C-alpha cells in the first residue's frame, strides 16, 4: 500500500526556518517525481515545488523561489522541504504528493502537516 | 503563475450531469495536454480523478470524464451521486516547467 506521511510542521515566527519531511512507503520511491502542494485551511490548493526522480531537476512557484528548497534522499525514501525566511502568508497545510507514473498529475497524497507562521 | 479560473460552485440533483470549467492561457491549459483534476471532500487530502486531460486512474468511476478545448478544460460528472459532493480543482503544467491549480469549485448535490 502506498503511503506518504508528512512531518515537521509547527509554529514558527516570521523570518524563521522549518524543514518538512515526507516518508514514503509501498512503492519504489526513486522512480517517481515528487511534489509539495500547500493549502490555507478553507482556501484552494497551491503548487509549491517539484523534484525529479534523482533530485537533479527541481522547480518552484514564484512565491517561494529562493526561500524554499526541495530535496530527496532515495536511500531513506524521504522527501524534504527546507523553508527559510518564512512569512505569515506561508501559513498552510503542506502536502507531499507523488507524480503519476505515466502522465501529469499526482496520484497519491499524504494527509498534510500544518505550518503556522506568526509572531 | 495566476490561478486557473473555475466557477465557485455548481450544483445538480442526483442522476443529473454537471460540468466544471477550468480556464487558463496558451502558456498552460491551452499549450499542453497536461491537465489533471482532483476531488477533495472536506477535511481530506485531494484525490486524482483525471490526468492528461481525459485519462481516468484505475478505480475512478466512469461517470467522471475530462476534455479540453483551446484554453479551457472541463470535468463532467454524469449521473451525479451524493458521494460526489466535494471541492474540485483542476491543475495544469505550464510553459515555465511549473504547475498551477485552479481556484476550486464546490459541487453540491441537491
Image (cartoon, helix red, strand yellow):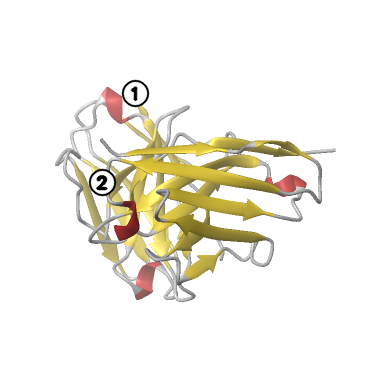
Residue B76: which disc?
A: 2
Q: Nearer the viewer's eye, disc 1 or disc 2?
A: 2
- Tell me where residue B86 appears, x and y as whole percent: 39, 32
Q: Chain of mark 1?
A: B
Quarter of the image with the C terminus of chain B is: top left
Q: Which residue is depicted at the point 36% across and 39% down?
A: B39
Decide if residue B102 is in sight here: no
Both labels 1 and 2 in a single chain = yes
Label 1 secondary element? loop
Label 2 secondary element? strand
Q: Which residue is depicted at the point 37% across and 60% down?
A: A33
- Tell me where residue B44 appears, x and y as whole percent: 43, 30
Q: Could you say which quadrant of the image residue B82 lies in?
A: top left
Q: Which residue is mark 1?
A: B110
Q: Is residue A68 above or below residue B105?
A: below
Judged left or right of residue B88, residue B15 is left
Judged left or right of residue B91, residue A13 is right
Mark 1–mark 2 Cα distance, whole angstroms, equals 17 Å
Decide if residue A31 is in sight here: yes
Q: Which of pointers 1 and 2 lies earlier in the amino acid sequence?
A: 2
**Neighbour tally class for label 1: few under 14, some 14-19, many 20 plus, Cα within 10 Å:** few
- Tell me where residue A9 appears, x and y as whole percent: 62, 37
Residue A93: which disc?
A: none
Going by the picture, which residue comes out furthest to the right? A119
Q: Is residue A69 above or below residue B83?
A: below
Amino acid at each position: 500500500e502506498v503511503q506518504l506521511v508528512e512531518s515537521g510542521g509547527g509554529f514558527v515566527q516570521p523570518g524563521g526556518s522549518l524543514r518538512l519531511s515526507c516518508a514514503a512507503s509501498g512503492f519504489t520511491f526513486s522512480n517517481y517525481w515528487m511534489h509539495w502542494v500547500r493549502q490555507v485551511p478553507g482556501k484552494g490548493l497551491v503548487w509549491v515545488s517539484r523534484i525529479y526522480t534523482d533530485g537533479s531537476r527541481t522547480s518552484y512557484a514564484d512565491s517561494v523561489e529562493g526561500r524554499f528548497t526541495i530535496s530527496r534522499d532515495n536511500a531513506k525514501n524521504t522527501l524534504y522541504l527546507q523553508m527559510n525566511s518564512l512569512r505569515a502568508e506561508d501559513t498552510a497545510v503542506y502536502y507531499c504528493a507523488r507524480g503519476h507514473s505515466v502522465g501529469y498529475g499526482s496520484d497519491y497524497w499524504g494527509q498534510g502537516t500544518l505550518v503556522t507562521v506568526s509572531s | 503563475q495566476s490561478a486557473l479560473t473555475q466557477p465557485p460552485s455548481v450544483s445538480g440533483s442526483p442522476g443529473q450531469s454537471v460540468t466544471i470549467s477550468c480556464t487558463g492561457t496558451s502558456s498552460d491549459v491551452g499549450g499542453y495536454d497536461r491537465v489533471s483534476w482532483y476531488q477533495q471532500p472536506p477535511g481530506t487530502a485531494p484525490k486524482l480523478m483525471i490526468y492528461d486531460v481525459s485519462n481516468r486512474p484505475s478505480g475512478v468511476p466512469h461517470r467522471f470524464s475530462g476534455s479540453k478545448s483551446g484554453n479551457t478544460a472541463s470535468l463532467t460528472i454524469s449521473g451525479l451521486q451524493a458521494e460526489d459532493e466535494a471541492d474540485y480543482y483542476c491543475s495544469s503544467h505550464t510553459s515555465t516547467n511549473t504547475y498551477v491549480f485552479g481556484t476550486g469549485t464546490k459541487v453540491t448535490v441537491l
